[in-house]
Image (spheres, rainbow, N blue to C red):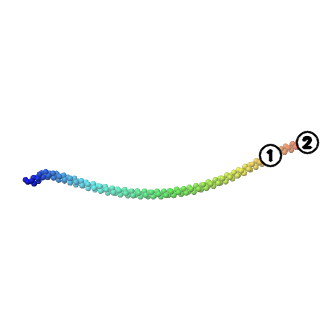
Amino acid sequence: MSMKEAVLAALKELVLPELQVLKQGQGEINATLTLTNKRLDDLNLHLADQSRRIDDTNKRIDAIHSDLIKRIDDTNTRFDAIHSDLIKRIDDTNTRFDAIHSDLIKRIDDTNKRIDAIHSDLIGRVDETNRSIARLYEVIVRREEHTDLVGRVRLLEQDLAEIKRRVAA
């Protein structure tokens, strides 16, 4: 046997069984790889479906977000309109209050002038009444003095008549 045959026989004995084990292992790995690739394909399909669902959900979220932003903007516009209307109404009410206030101040001033005029008139009347009472008092006092004088004159006349009668007697 030649060296070549001996090496070939040794290789067949040592390497061929190992090659057979390696081929069998590689077959198992290929089978596992095929199953793993199938599982990866299934996972990729599932992930693609989930990605599509996520994209659909994001689109719905974006649509809802846009709708909510529009509604908030519409609400803010309504608030602004209501705010402007309320400010106008408050300003109108304040203007009316100012007009009423001015009118009331004028009326109070007019009433105070009338009260002052009535007060002055009443003071004048009281003074006039006091003067009339003073004059009346003077007249009453004169009447009393006159009555007293009349009485004294009668007494004097009686005394004089008595004296004349005594003198004549």
Give the image location of residue 61, x and y in percent: 37, 56
Image height of 157 relative to 3, above or below: above
Which residue is depicted at the point 89% across and 42% down? 163
The secondary element bearing badge 1 is classed as helix
- Residue type at mark 1: give it: Glu
Residue projecting furthest to the right: 169
23 left or right, relative to 63 = left
Q: Earlier in the sequence, mark 2 or mark 1?
A: 1
118 left or right, relative to 70 = right
152 left or right, relative to 21 = right
Q: Residues within 10 Å of mark 2 (few under 14, many from 20)?
A: few
Residue projecting furthest to the front: 3
- Residue type at mark 2: give it: Val
Report which residue position mark 1 lands on: 145
Which residue is depicted at the point 86% across and 44% down? 157
- What is the CA distance from the residue labelled 2 to the residue labelled 1? 32 Å
Report which residue position mark 2 lands on: 167
Give the image location of residue 20, x and y in percent: 15, 52
Image height of 70 relative to 147, above or below: below
Give the image location of residue 101, x and y in percent: 58, 55
Which residue is depicted at the point 50% across and 57% down? 87
Image height of 156 relative to 42, above or below: above
Q: Residues within 10 Å of mark 1 (few under 14, many from 20)?
A: few
